[in-house]
Image: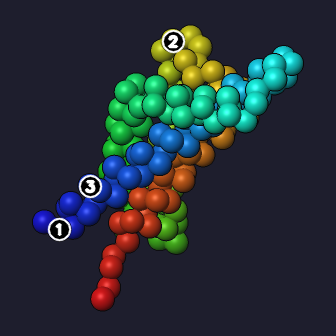
Amino acid sequence: MKTWWRRLLAFLISALVTTALVSLGHSLFVQAALADLGTNLPIHIRLGAMLRDFVGLIPTLGPVVLGSLLIAFLIAGWLRPRAGWLAPFAYPLAGWAAIALALAAMRLSFGFSPLAGARTPAGFLVMSLGGLVGGLVFAWLDRKRTA
């Protein structure tokens, strides 16, 4: 039973980290676009916007990340024993693929990306890499403890 709770906690932490990084990528790319238009954004405005974006995206982006990572990590967990030397990369790659697919699905569903930061190839890449980091976090927290 302890293993189940530890895995659930690892999953929730990795989803929170992923959501935070995707939100941060969104904020940074939106702010960069505003700066390109000549808007002066002092640091306190930038930091406040990042925090408000994260809090505002939790109710909508959070469930998307949770669902995407759940499916991806279940598949990665099934494939891992069969992956040979690629096994250590299973969860990070699954996290990256989950977020990339979620961003692509949103774009296809709405006809545009509802996350403005993902509307450029660079923004899409940076935001999807948040899933890779989330997969690394999950793999690190879920590792077998020997003591």
Of residues 79 and 47, the one drawn nearer to the viewer in this rendering = 47
Q: Which mark is residue 110?
A: 2
Q: Which of marks 2 and 1 is in front?
A: 1
Q: Is mark 1 on a helix, strand or loop?
A: helix
- Mark 3 is surrounded, within 10 Å at the Cα level, by few (under 14), some (14 to 19) or many (20 or more) other residues, namely some
> Residues at badges 2 and 1 in contact (C-beta under 8 Å)?
no
Alpha-carbon span between mark 3 and mark 2: 32 Å
Whether residues under marks 1 and 3 lie with C-beta atoms below 8 angstroms apart, the answer is no
Instruction: Name the quadrant of the C terminus.
Output: bottom left
Any mark on residue 8, and which?
Answer: 3
Question: Disc 3 on helix, strand or loop?
Answer: helix
Location of residue 112 with respect to 105 vertically, above or below:
above
Residue 24 in the image: state x and y as whole percent: 60, 38
The CA distance from mark 2 to mark 1 is 41 Å
Answer whether residue 100 is visible to the viewer in this image: no
Residue at 54%, 51% (x, y): give it: 132
The mark nearer the N terminus, 1 or 3, is 1
Identify the mark nearer the N-term, 3 or 2.
3
Kind of residue indicated by mark 1: Lys
Type of residue at label 3? Leu
> Residue 113, labelled with which disc?
none
The numbered mark at residue 2 is 1
